[in-house]
Amino acid sequence: MSKDKNKRPLFDAAIVRQALTDCVRKLSPARQARNPVMFTVYVGSILTTLLAVQAYSGQGEAPFGFVASVSAWLWATVLFANFAEAMAEGRGKAQAAALRGLRQDVAAKKLVHPRRDSPFVPVPAKSLHRGDLMLVEAGDTIPSDGEIVEGIASVDESAITGESAPVIREAGGDRSAVTGGTRLLSDWLVVKVAAESGETFLDRMISLVEGAKRRKTPNEIALNILLASLTLIFLVVCVTLKPMSAFAVALSGQGQTVTITALAALFVCLAPTTIGGLLSAIGIAGMDRLIQAGVIATSGRAVEAAGDVDVLLLDKTGTITLGNRQASNFLPVSGVDERELAEAAQLASLADETPEGRSIVVLAKERFGIRGRDLHELGATFVPFTAQTRLSGVNLPERLIRKGAPDAIKALAEHSGQRIPKEIDLFIHDIAKSGGTPLLVSENGRPLGAIWLKDIVKGGIRERFAELRSMGIKTIMVTGDNALTAAAIAAEAGVDDFLAEATPEAKLARIRQYQAEGKMVAMTGDGTNDAPALAQADVGVAMNSGTQAAKEAGNMVDLDSNPTKLLEVVAIGKQLLMTRGSLTTFSISNDIAKYFAIIPAVFAGIYPQLGVLDVMELATPKSAVLSAVVFNALIIVVLIPLALKGVKYVPAPAAMALRRNLLIYGLGGLLVPFAGIKLIDVIISALGWA
């Protein structure tokens, strides 16, 4: 599910057609009651419809054309709000339909015993239960989510991630999880089922993206309560205006009692219907943008929390650095020529397929023109690296060349009876202090010198951290390196702090420390040892390539397994909050112009002094009421693209973002309705509708 793959037009024709149908289906009272603001508009639409029927029979409080027009535009307001929500849901349902196509009723090979050569029983995938063992062979579709207990194989995960390159999955370590619906390309795996039928990762993705389990977030609930409270206040005000206007008419002997139709129009224009109609769409669209970025969130609350994050814990490898250390210099000891060291290092690395080994060969060629040689012709035997020896190298006739960790090379020298030159410790200290990793080289046990392996900091990462800092977000680099190395890389990358020699306990303690200070913390992880910290963090982004424990602990899963994605997640969260805040500001501001349109039209007959409020000089009272109602409905349609796409996110301090928000959406919300209502009034007058 790469970003490009998920990208679709804002108004896809198929989604629009479905939304047009769904917006009518949503007219049921039960559905409307979920949104208190729009429910009152719904009730007002029914009331004015009944008044229009009464007016048609010749017994109405106002002309049929006027009442019917107001009623029609109130219904349009409800339908437009339904359409906005249906469009947002439709985008999620389109994602879900694509994912549902990946579910296949495949047969699983359920093992009788927990080993490769055990007999198996073919069973439907849906009959598998947590803890069952299954055999998956080359060409098979993996029937269910699980943990590999035996084997190593290449897996095609393009159906989930959108990435065509296969990935390696193996038992043990942090890449032992497999996802149901993906396909095995080679070899075989014994997998322990980790999810019941209907609860797999694919099932949860489908449920989440189509909004079936979307719950309102705390911020959304709080805003709904505020909007409902304002709506209730305006409702009480409008209800009391009827008897008050009757009393005023009787007392002054002029004007007419305010009609129920006019009061319904006044109420709808006073109530925060713009944000009320778009609020649900904003939340659903925020989840959709996250999905398009290749991240699945378990709840809207996680997305909002990302927007409120104060502290980011970022793994050094793969997030801040490229992840592949590169050889940058040869440092020979006294009595050894640099070319001699480079030649020995190159020979020891010719059969080393690691990025570090290849970079040593490249550096030797660039510095001294030393070209690759055929180990077979040299009569050489390659010695692979192991976790026990922490060495690799090559055996040549009369030459045993090794490269490896400093303590391993020192131990080899002592075992061979060789003296360890005094420069070695100096090299180790200087390289570590500068943020590099020292790799020592020896020949026949005699240390020749050191290779400086440098962590390459990603281009542009320092600027991104500066942007985050300007927004008040603190960045913490987490690494297993020693404090000297960590400090050097942290300084080069521009992070605010670092956690060196990090253990799972240290990460957890640091997260709890920041949370105790009232801060929101986000982090990424992929291993079982990351699970406690992912569960503790307010935003825990687990890598899809990681273990099942990590994915269950976090509240987001990055399908692309890109640790840098955390920065994008924070931006999407902030964009969601900014969009909601901007449209709320616009909604409240744009109500002011409606007051200037409707209040003079409704009450100027009773209180002529209110005529001074008619700054727009609208044609007639009926035209004024109708123009305000029409604008109130149409503005929802105009703002649907913004609700779906989101307000453009610009990294900036909170105070600056607030000023920008007030200038564009506050002032804009104040001025646009004056022009819009006046234009509609001119059109209505020209057509003779009021």
Image (tube, rainbow, N blue to C red):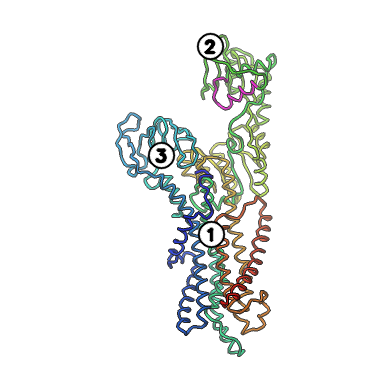
Vertical comparison of 360 with 101: above or below: above
- N-terminal of the pair, mark 3 or mark 2, is 3
Is residue 355 shown in magenta? yes
| Neighbourhood count class around disc 3 (C-alpha, 10 Å): few under 14, some 14–19, many 20 upward | many
Whether residue 649 is situated above or below residue 255 in the rendered picture: above
Residue type (three-letter) at the residue carrying disc 1: Glu
Q: Quadrant of residue 683?
A: bottom right
SS category of the residue bearing label 3: strand
Vertical arrangement, residue 72 with respect to residue 91, above or below: below
Q: Nearer the viewer, mark 3 or mark 2?
A: 2
Of the residues shown, which amino acid type is indicated by label 2?
Gly
Q: Which residue is mark 3?
A: 146
Label 2, on which residue?
A: 379
Q: Residue furthest toward the front?
A: 687
Residue located farthest toward the top when viewing the structure as drawn? 398
Q: Main secondary structure of the magenta part?
A: helix
Q: Which residues are magenta?
A: 349-365
Mark 1–mark 2 CB contact (< 8 Å): no
Q: Which residue is mark 1?
A: 220
**Which residue is more in the foreground, 483 or 96?**
96
Q: Is residue 432 left or right of residue 243?
A: right
Disc 3 vs disc 2: Cβ atoms closer than 8 Å? no
